[in-house]
Image: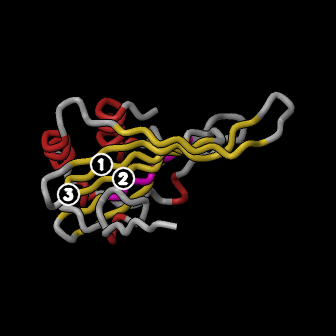
Amino acid sequence: MTYRNYGLSGTRLMPMSYANAKQSLRIWFSGSSSIDKVYTLALEKDSSSTGYRIEIGQKFTKTGKPLDYLSHISFSPSEGFANFFKAWENLDPFQYKDQEDKDFEIVYDNPFRFIIVEYAIDHKYIKFRFQTGAPAYRKVEEFLRTKLLIM
C-alpha cells in the first residue's frame, strides 16, 4: 500500500482552525435534504489556489433503501480567487457570531436551511452559523448565493 502524506493545507477536510493556508473559507450548507454540501476555497502560501464542493449524505432508491453518497467537484470563482477573497473580506467576517439558538425558527412541515461558515487568515480563525433568511446575516447569505451559487 502506498501512502500520500499531505500537509495541513486549506484544502483538507479538517477544521479550518488547523489550516496552514494563507487564506481559506469553508461553507457547510444543509438544505433540508439528505445531502449536505461543503464548499472550500483556499489560497495557499505558495500562491496556488483551490476550490471544491463536496456533497455527502444518502440518496434513496425507489424502494426507499438508503445508499451512501459522496461527490467531489473542483471549481474556481468566476472573478478569480484573489478577487473572491477581497470581496469576502469587505463583509468584515470577524464581526459575525453564531446566531442565537432562540432565533432559529424550525417549522416542522417546511424546509430548514442553515449555513456554517469557517474562515481562516493569517492564523486568525472564525466560525459562525445561521439560518438562511436571518436579517443579521443577509449580506453573507447574498454573497454566498451570488458568488458560490449556494441555495
C-alpha span from label 2 to label 3: 14 Å
Nearest to the eye among marks 2 and 3: give it: 3
Mark 2 and mark 3 lie on one chain; the one further toward the N terminus is 2
In this view, the residue in front, 12 or 106, is 12
Q: Residues within 10 Å of mark 3 (few under 14, many from 20)?
A: some
| Kind of element beneath mark 1 | strand
Residue drawn at x 42%, y 42% is: 53
In the picture, measured across the screen, residue 119 lies left or right of residue 101, that is: left
Q: Answer whether labels 2 and 1 touch (C-beta < 8 Å).
A: yes
Residue drawn at x 30%, y 59% is: 10
Q: Residue flagged by tag 3: what amino acid is it?
A: Glu
Q: Residues within 10 Å of mark 2 (few under 14, many from 20)?
A: many
Question: Picture coordinates of residue 14 (x, y %)?
Answer: 42, 65
| Kind of element beneath mark 3 | loop
Q: Which residue is mark 3?
A: 44
Identify the magenta region. Answer: 113-118
Image position of 122 with respect to 81: above or below: below
Which quadrant holds residue 44? bottom left
Q: Which residue is mark 2?
A: 26
Mark 2 and mark 1 lie on one chain; the one further toward the N terminus is 2
Q: Which residue is mark 1?
A: 41
In the picture, measured across the screen, residue 66 lies left or right of residue 16, that is: right
| Kind of element beneath mark 2 | strand
Q: Residue flagged by tag 2: what amino acid is it?
A: Arg
Q: Is residue 45 magenta?
A: no
